[in-house]
Image (spheres, helix red, strand yellow):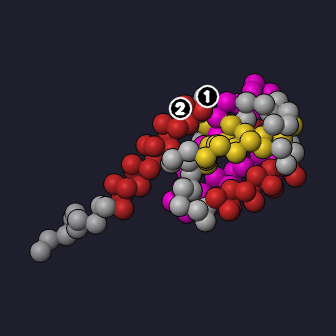
Amino acid sequence: MEVKIDTKEKFTVLTPLNPELTDIIAAEIAETCSLQLQKEVKNVILNLQSVSKMEEKAAQTLTAIQQAFYENHASFVICSLQAPVEGALNKLELLEVLNITPSESEAWDIVQMEEIERELLDGDDMGFGTRE
């Protein structure tokens, strides 16, 4: 798999280098992401700047990856979509389902906001709504 991996403080950026995201490459990304969920820094940004074509099964795999991340209290954000990939996701009605941002820096912002949300929700056991 030709994917650049860049580890940051709060997330890891995966950038596929092939112009086509096949179901095989998506499965390899899913495996890498599964391993990432076992680490302290779980959040992943998938930068698709080099991808100009995506197979349908690959798109479905990305949806499953995102769901697995949210079930594990982690963020999975896709960024830098090329027009043909955006069109393919729209055709499959996945564009609105996936967490997508125009740029990597905006994806960073989403990850940081979701981290803050999770921290606030985890600390939200003050007993609101209960009377003593």
Residue in the picture at 41% in, 55% down: 118
Secondary structure found at label 1: loop
Characterize the magenta stretch by its predominant secondary structure.
Answer: helix
Label 2 Cα neighbours within 10 Å, binned few <14 / some 14-19 / many ≥20: some
Residue 34 drawn at (x, y percent)? 68, 61
User: Which residue type does callout 1 highlight?
Assistant: Pro
Badge 2 marks a residue whose secondary structure is: helix
Task: Answer above or below: position of 70 versus 125.
Answer: above
Residue range corresponding to the magenta coloring: 57-86
Task: Name the side, left or right, on which 39 lies relative to 31.
Answer: left
| Residue 45 shown in magenta | no
Residue 64 lies in quadrant: bottom right
Residue at the disc numbered 1: 102
Find residue 126 and report its image quarter: bottom left
Q: For the residue marked with disc 2, what is the amino acid?
A: Glu
- Quarter of the rendering containing residue 31: bottom right
- Report, in whole angstroms, how far the alpha carbon at label 2 lies from the one at label 1: 7 Å
Q: Which residue is mark 2?
A: 106
- The question of residue 60 being in magenta is answered with yes
Can residue 56 be seen? no
Q: Position of residue 130 (x, y in %)?
A: 19, 70
